[in-house]
Amino acid sequence: MNLSFTAPFKTSKLSIAVLVVSSLFVSPLVFAAGGGDAPEIKRQEWSFSGFFGRYDKAQLQRGFGVYNEVCSSCHGLKLLSYRNLAEKGGPEFSKEQALAIAKEATVIDGVDDEGEPLERPGKLSDRFVPPFKNEAAARSVNNGAYPPDLSVMAKARTFHRHVPWYTEPYYWLYDITTGYEEKGVDYLYALLMGYKTAPRGVVLNDGMSYNTVFPGHQIAMAAPLSEDAVEYADGTPTTLDQHARDVSAFLAWTAEPHLNARKDMGKRVLLYLVILALLLYLAKRSVWSRVKH
Amino acid sequence: MSDHSSSYEPSNGFTRWLDERLPIMRLMHGQFIDFPTPRNLNYLWTFGAILTFCLMVQIITGIILAMHYVPHGMHAWSSVEHIMRDVNWGDLIRYTHAVGASMFFLAAYIHMFRGLYYGSYKSPREILWILGVMIILCMIMTAFMGYSLVWGQMSFWAVTVITNLFTAIPVVGESITQWIWGGYSVGDPTLNRLLSLHYLFPFIIAALVGLHIWALHVVGSNNPVGVEAKTPKDSVSFFPFYVIKDGFAVIVFALLFAWFVFYAPNYLGHSDNFNEANPLQTPPHIVPEWYFLPFYAILRAIPDKLLGVIAMVAAICVLFVIPWLDTSKVRSTSYRPLYKPFFWLFVITCLALGYLGAKAPEGYYLLASQLFTAYYFIHFLVVMPLIGMIETPKQLPDSIAEDVLEDTSEAEKA
Ligand code: HEM
């Protein structure tokens, strides 16, 4: 099912019916983009969105590849440890693979007898080693701009739809009933796909690139991805779109590492509550049948 | 009501022994088993039980969060992420607490509109109502302080904006603000006291809830008809009738709660709070959580800072005096044809202010917030006193039993 809505809509029994029916399917929704240069960001289909959503571990592995080979030279993942790569509900690399990844990093740990810092290869329990020693070092090689840490980036960004105000409650309900938590991921994907040549008349500052969805449209990060930027072991086509999707999905996982377990547990809790509610309702009916009320 | 005789009979040696020394079982039995409750309550009366549930959920999840949280500017934000990632089921505990705050306010607002519609604040329930207003005030402060603990961008700047309001106080404003901060800006000392008070306030709320229920049990529940229960025929015992009904309602509410916790935990939050606090970078939009938006709209509707603050505080404090502003003798709005459309206009006003609180205060948005702010106060200060004086209410039934059983012959039999 592929519903596309253009607001305004009529408030009627029909629209309520559409709401109820559409909320049963997690369908990509085309949002009517309004006013002038407002970026148009679309809701994408992700394996991990909605009631039945789960991470696709093959996609997370590919996404890690993209992060590791491209983004990690500028962006850190300071909230993650290498062991997370082998944990359930993530890319689920084998312990050996995760250890091999950890060992590529150099960790400064303690001092030697002369007080000099000691270096050793990374271990599973280490946090991801950041690409720069500190913010100043990062800025000095990035034209004065700071590449932010990406650990929770997929939740730290969002976008606003441009729809008439009286349709907003409808979208709130739609988003709540479909469990739409991926606005930030959709932004990441749109950002990575959003590099265009600047329209005529737009003058870019030194070292800046034009991006359709970045606020202000001038971003200090040059387009990081291109076709065939990274090799995939599983034979998935290495298009720009695929790279952007995979790395966005990977960052969704770094931001919300326990999503699979949470959604699994949710189903059991809801089932339990529904049964309990039914039983209580029947008990309530039978108790109250004794008196008129 | 409180003097109804308890049918409690200790069933064994131990409870008999206890009853002669501390008749706590007798008290509980009288208040929560035998307690006579109007037989005609609708589901809006289940929100008291739902709110009790919410308070317990916040306290339990909050105590666990506090075991792992670090109230320090350098570590607060990452300690919350540590809870989300490394504590067993920490993400669920935190999401339950964060979503729980929203659910708590949702239930509290429904509970309050129930009271407004059915005139539950009128004599003899003034103290009961005032205790309720004190509870919502404490809830507002608790939730504000809790939100700040995350120490993300939105937390930090919300604290900055709100504490800065104190500078509007003439003469001593500056010193009071610095005293609150514990320094010359929002910083570590501020964060430490926020945690200390955020831990304390829920227990003040719990104590107020105790008084609230005590006051309720002195005068008894109001009901949809708004005539007092007089004879035993008007009431049923709390157990099993309302225990089972409240229990059912709590579980239905828990379903909504669980939906948010498991499938939309961040929907009600703000993405900017996933960026760590940065005192040097003001976020493009500073917006509070949804439950504060109506008050935020009132604050910003008024161009003068001090007057804005006064209006915002007054918006809640006016509730303290409505038992005396409402001149109508009739409680339930169902029997007040003239007042009824104004009641709904007031509900729309609150929703509209909530919507406008999230928008930039400029152009039509600003104008609309000013109009709705005006009506918010006109409703209490003009409409309530005036309509009570000029309105002819509908004929009230003589008793609850008469209303429920329709004709009196049945009422006599029942
Ligand atoms: C009246 C009841 C309460 C309300 C309305 C409330 C509200 C809140 C809110 C809105 C937050 C921010 C949530 C977030 O975005 O993560 C929060 C956080 C927090 N609360 Fe509470 N709370 C209550 C009771 C408690 C209690 C009893 C405790 C401890 C004994 C507690 C401890 C904490 C801690 C440590 C945090 C910060 C960690 C976090 O962000 O998850 N709370 N609270």
Image (spheres, rainbow, N blue to C red):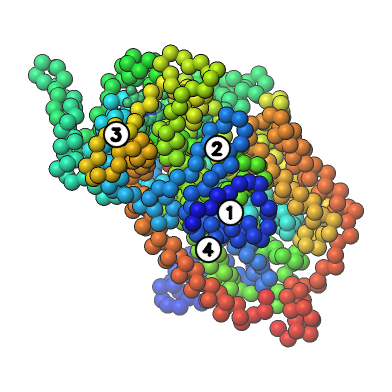
- Can residue A119 be spotted in the picture? yes
Secondary structure of residue under mark 2 = loop
Image-quadrant location for residue B309: top right
Front position among marks 2 and 3: 3
Q: Which mark, by number, is residue A160?
A: 2
Q: Amino acid at mark 1?
A: Ala
Q: Is the residue marked 4 within 8 Å of ligand 1, measured from its CB? A: no
Front residue of A95/B374: it is A95
State the residue at coordinates (51%, 15%): A203
The residue beneath circle 1 is B107
State the residue at coordinates (55%, 37%): A160
Residue A237 drawn above or below residue B392: above
Whether pointer 2 and pointer 3 mark residues with C-beta atoms closer than 8 Å, the reply is no
Front position among marks 4 and 1: 4
The residue beneath circle 3 is A228
Residue B137 at what x, y percent from top left? 61, 43
Q: Are marks 2 and 3 on the same chain?
A: yes
